[in-house]
Amino acid sequence: MMEVAGPWTEVFESSERKEKSGGAETLLGSSTLTLAPLVSDSPSVRRSQPIFITTNRAKDVESFSSSVPSIPNPFPELCSPSKSPVLINSLPPPSGDKYVIKVYGEDSHSRSLCVCPGATAREVCHMLVQTAHCSDQENWALLELHPTLGLERCLEDHEVVLEVQATWSLKGDTRLVFCKNYAKYEFFRKPVLFFPESMISDSADVSKGMKSSELIQNLLRSGTCPEIQGFLHLKEPSRKTWKKVYFFLRRSGLYCSTKGSSKEPRHLQYVADLEDLNVYTVVNSRKLYGAPADFTFCIKPSRNPVRVQDLKFLCAENEQTRTCWTSAFRLFKYGKQLQCNYQLSKSAPRSLEGSNLTDNKSKSEASLVAMDFSGKAGGRVIQNPTEAQNAEKEEGQAWRRREALRCSLPNLSSAARPSSIHKTQPWFHGGVSRKEAQRLIEKQGLVDGMFLIRESQQHAQCFVLSLCYQLKTKHYLVIPCEDGGRKYLTMDDGLTLFIDLLQLVEFHQINKGILPVCLKHPCVCVAL
């Protein structure tokens, strides 16, 4: 206590009171002292709220952390940005986001596309047709390819691409391939060829005088398929041995008989459910799995990654039998959806050709006009589009005929000969082997009229025309010959002569000649 003469009182900032008396100063006790709170009791401030950290302190912390040397992340692929330890897969994907998929062409080059989560195979093919500037819009498909296992499957037009990729193994080499497939819906056009009468189950209703062809057509229109039966070679698990088993394919599933070809219920064993499986064609099955023939296919659960232990390998006696089984699997699984896809595939190309292709052609050729210089009065502009196209075609054929005749002269040296025009055609595949030519045709669809031309590996200066007819690939030798001192090409020992391969193809696209069917679909190699 300090005594000050003269009492007096004073309040400082409403927190302290003092008394002055006779020059002496006395500090009053707590009972007479008014204290101000350290924090004002304002209703806008609550004591339970966290303390705000000033920017100066944050800057100090950041400068401190930046002064410490950074430790490299040993698992950069598990984290999102470089400074974030959060796993990418642990964050939910934002709604409406785009996804990047990689699609390969048949030349092993790839193209990346940004697609929506629900993009179907038909939509992705349409995008690739536009970006790759393909000449036509029809019969394109996405192929699911497993190179190591030798498995191939054509995606249905309604399948969601991202859902298919979600079933792939992260360590595998599975890829999507953009290619032609002319046989995707061929069983709707020629059902009797794909479903022979010998393979239709006896339980089919043919007792009302209905022919098997009429029965098949009625079933296909209703979105189903006749029951299929027959012998197949089944690969035993974990072994390269095969045994012959009698199978039945019904709407309820795939069954096999434990006693010969008996179809009694007590002899039938359930094999697989059609709703939860995909059918794959097996390439090079003799070497990979020791199959008794090359006509092998397999089934696997559609929602599981591809594992060898989950695959059931089946081998048929010929290509028609394999195609019948695989087509029946598709029809029983998807039903009317395939019929809808088939109708869309027939109507879509017409609308696309009328809009996009015409617009692109008009923009690229806006500065070009067709001229006719055949008259004596000079050139004239051809106004009629049909006449302009005919004039362009005739001029190209005349130029090709002059070049071919000039190159066929016997006194022309080989060094002076220009490069053959057939090498620029999509149906020419160079020096591919006979087996590779068959694989290419099978990959793009075993339909009548599918063809390619290749160089012969056994006969010098000769070519081979590989043609598909009734699910089989036939090969015809094209040999050079001379007539009147000029060189030609022929397939019938000189009865019909062609100045080059282009004329040979154009002739057989209209006339069968010695071929069983006209040339219709060129087997092309797609490059992205």
Image (spheres, rainbow, N blue to C red):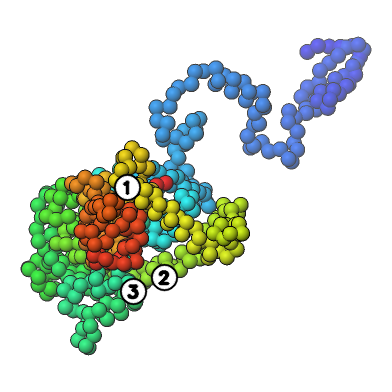
How busy is the neighbourhood of tag 3: few (under 14 within 10 Å), some, or many (20 plus)?
some
Residue occupying image coordinates x 23% and y 65% = 514
Query: Circle 2 sits on which residue?
Result: 343
Q: CA distance from mark 2 to mark 3?
A: 13 Å
Return the x and y of residue 270 as percentages of the image width and height.
18, 65
Quadrant the N terminus occupies: top right
Mark 2 closeness class: few <14, some 14–19, many ≥20 residues within 10 Å? few
**Who comes first in sequence, dot 2 or dot 3?**
3
Front in this rendered view, residue 436 or 6:
436
Q: Is residue 184 visible?
A: no
Disc tally is 3
Q: Amino acid at mark 3?
A: Gly
On the image, numbered disc 3 is attached to which residue? 223
Q: Are marks 3 and 1 in contact (CB under 8 Å)?
A: no
**Nearer the viewer's eye, disc 2 or disc 3?**
2
Specify the quadrant of the image occupied by residue 438. bottom left
Q: Name which of mark 1 and mark 2 comes first in the sequence.
A: 2
Q: Residue at x 28, y 51 (%)?
A: 485
Of the image marks 3 and 1, the number of the one nearer the N terminus:
3
Type of residue at label 2?
Gln
